[in-house]
Each structure stands twice: as structure tokens, then as C-alpha cells.
Image (spheres, rainbow, N blue to C red):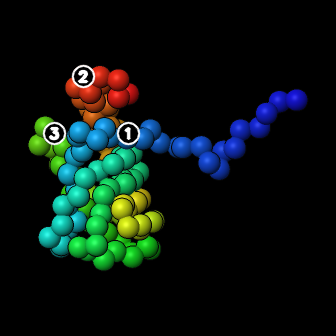
């Protein structure tokens, strides 16, 4: 009997998980808050968050993500999940795939065994 793949739980976009020693920075627009990107894909971001800022699931959010080479992107999205430790945002517009590829190359070259 052939096994069926569960498409509802499979990832549609390549996702980067960052090592503990390196994280791009995320700034929430309109707030004095900077956090660390934990995971990133073309369609969303998971970043660290503490109780300094109050965020609500379902709310719109604009963020600025800055990478190791100084390149940054302003992205808008919807907050999907908020916990005591992190926030997940789904972007309205896509982060360019070339940026994801640059990050993958950077991680492979600078963090042996990470990828």
C-alpha cells in the first residue's frame, strides 16, 4: 500500500533556521524594539520577542529586517502567532528568493555544519 503525503503540513517555501550565534535583526516599525530573526522564508518570519512590546494575533505589522551585509527589507504582514518568546508574521509581499539564497550561502560558508 502506498503511503499518502500529508500536504496540509508540508512546507511550501524554503525556510532558514539561524544558528544561535548569528541572527539578522528585525525592527518593528513605529516601535522602539529590535529582535532577532529565528526563522525566515519568502513568506514569513519568526523572531524573538519579549514583554517590552504588546502584539496581537491577527494584527497587521510592518517590520524592517537587516542582514549581515547591511541589506535591509521593509515588509508588511499579519501576525499569525504570539508567544512569550517569539512572534510569527506572514508577509503580504514576498521577501525575494535571491535574499534567501544569499543567506543560505552565508550560513554555509560561515557556520560549518549548520545547513
Q: Please tell me in which quadrant of the rendered image residue 1 appears.
A: top right
- Label 2 near label 1: C-beta < 8 Å? no
Residue 50 lies, with reference to residue 111, above or below; the image says below
Tell me which label, 2 or 3, sits earlier in the chain. 3
Identify the mark nearer the N-term, 1 or 2: 1
Q: Which residue is mark 3?
A: 68
Q: Secondary structure at mark 3?
A: loop
Quote the CA–CA distance across marks 1 and 2. Answer: 14 Å
Number of other residues with Cα within 10 Å of mark 2, as a class: few under 14, some 14 to 19, many 20 or more: few
Residue in view at x 30 percent, y 58 percent: 48
Judging by the rendered image, the residue that carries numbered circle 2 is 109
Cα separation, mark 1 vs mark 3, equals: 15 Å
| Mark 1, residue position | 16
Residue at 25%, 53% in the rendered image: 36
Q: Pointer 1: residues within 10 angstroms few (<14), some, or many (20+)? A: some
Location of residue 6 in the rendering, given as x and y in whole percent from the top left corner: 69, 44
Secondary structure found at label 2: helix
Residue at the location (15% across, 43% down)? 71
Give the quarter of the image for residue 55: bottom left
Amino acid at each position: 500500500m502506498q503511503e499518502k503525503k500529508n500536504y496540509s503540513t508540508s512546507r511550501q517555501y524554503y525556510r532558514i533556521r539561524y544558528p544561535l550565534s548569528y541572527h539578522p535583526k528585525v525592527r518593528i516599525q513605529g516601535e522602539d524594539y529590535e529582535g532577532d530573526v529565528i526563522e525566515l522564508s519568502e513568506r514569513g518570519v519568526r523572531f524573538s520577542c519579549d514583554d517590552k512590546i504588546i502584539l496581537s494575533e491577527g494584527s497587521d505589522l510592518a517590520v524592517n529586517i537587516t542582514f549581515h551585509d547591511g541589506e535591509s527589507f521593509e515588509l508588511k504582514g499579519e501576525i499569525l502567532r504570539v508567544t512569550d518568546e517569539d512572534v510569527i508574521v506572514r508577509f503580504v509581499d514576498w521577501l525575494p528568493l535571491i535574499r534567501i539564497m544569499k543567506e543560505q550561502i552565508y550560513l554555509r560558508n560561515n557556520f560549518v555544519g549548520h545547513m
